[in-house]
Amino acid sequence: MKLYYSPGACSLSPHIVTCEAELPLELIKVDLNNKLTETKEDFQQLNPNGYVPLLILDDGNQLTEGPAIVQYLADQAPDKKLIPLAGTFERYKAQQWLNFISTEIHKSFGLLFNPAASDATKELAVDILKKRLAIVAEQLSSQPYLLGETFSVADAYLFVTLSWGQYVNVDISRWPALARYADKISERPAVQKAMKAEGLI
């Protein structure tokens, strides 16, 4: 499999999941500014959306969108229990969290990184983030992970989005549960491996 990524972007989430699942993976770095891969391929031709992640399977099939990719990867290593079994209520809870992170947290952070966004738009995004992060902090105040006692793909995704706060003045330390959670996940061997591979630590 090939994972097209940009260091520290949302593609770090499937990268972490791949490391947790101990799946073989070829990493290909993408410069999102000029849309070229490190091998000088036109990334826009590979993924017309123009953003990472992109997963290309050995048979040529492709997946885009992080929440879909992490579910696929987790299902390739069911013994690692990175996502509940398909068809169970717990699986839908995992999908609920993946959707919430994608639409409520990821997208709000995205506005803060957008140089074309007005100050008013960014203020609104921060207000939304504060409300949404408070919800997540409440969930994590009584349990170690989003789904309870077990690390899942939703935690990989949330961890990556929380890491963006340092770049846009969203200090997660105002929510002690989130700060503890992020610190704990950052220490996982698979997370360390993925971050080192992307040059983040």
Image (spheres, rainbow, N blue to C red):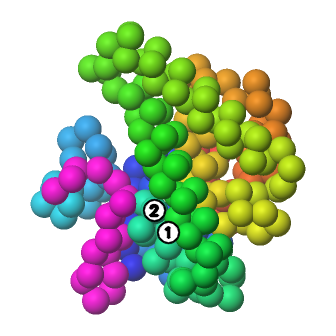
Task: Tell me if 136 is positioned left or right of 200 in this view.
Answer: right
Name the one closer to the observer, 115 or 7: 115
- Please tell me whether residue 54 is drawn above or below residue 117 in the rendered image: below
Helix, strand or loop at label 2? It is helix
**Residue found at the very far top of the displayed protein:** 119
- Marks 1,2: beta carbons within 8 A: yes
User: Which residue is identified by label 1?
Assistant: 70
Q: Which residue is drawn at 41% across and 68% down?
A: 68
Task: Tell me if 32 is positioned left or right of 194 in this view.
Answer: left
- Please tell me whether residue 123 is drawn above or below residue 201 in the rendered image: above
Residue 67: assigned label: 2
Residue 118 pos. (x, y %)? 32, 13
Q: Quadrant of the C terminus?
A: top right
Q: Which residue is drawn at 68% across and 43% down?
A: 136
Residue 78 pos. (x, y %)? 62, 87
Mark 2 surroundings: few (<14), some (14-19) or many (≥20) residues within 10 A: many
Name the one closer to the observer, 150 or 91: 91
Q: Quadrant of the N terminus?
A: bottom left
Which residue type does callout 2 highlight?
Answer: Pro
Please tell me whether the stretch drawn in magenta is mainly helix, strand or loop: loop
How many marks on residues? 2
Residue 119 pos. (x, y %)? 38, 10
Residue 73 pos. (x, y %)? 50, 77
Helix, strand or loop at label 1? It is helix
Name the one closer to the observer, 161 or 125: 125
Residue 140: assigned label: none
Task: Tell me if 138 is positioned left or right of 77 in this view.
Answer: right
- Please tell me whether residue 149 is drawn above or below residue 155 in the rendered image: below
- Dividing the picture into quadrants, the one containing residue 145 is bottom right
- Please tell me whether residue 162 is drawn above or below residue 11 in the rendered image: above
What range of the chain is rendered magenta? 48-65
Task: Tell me if 117 is positioned left or right of 12 in this view.
Answer: left
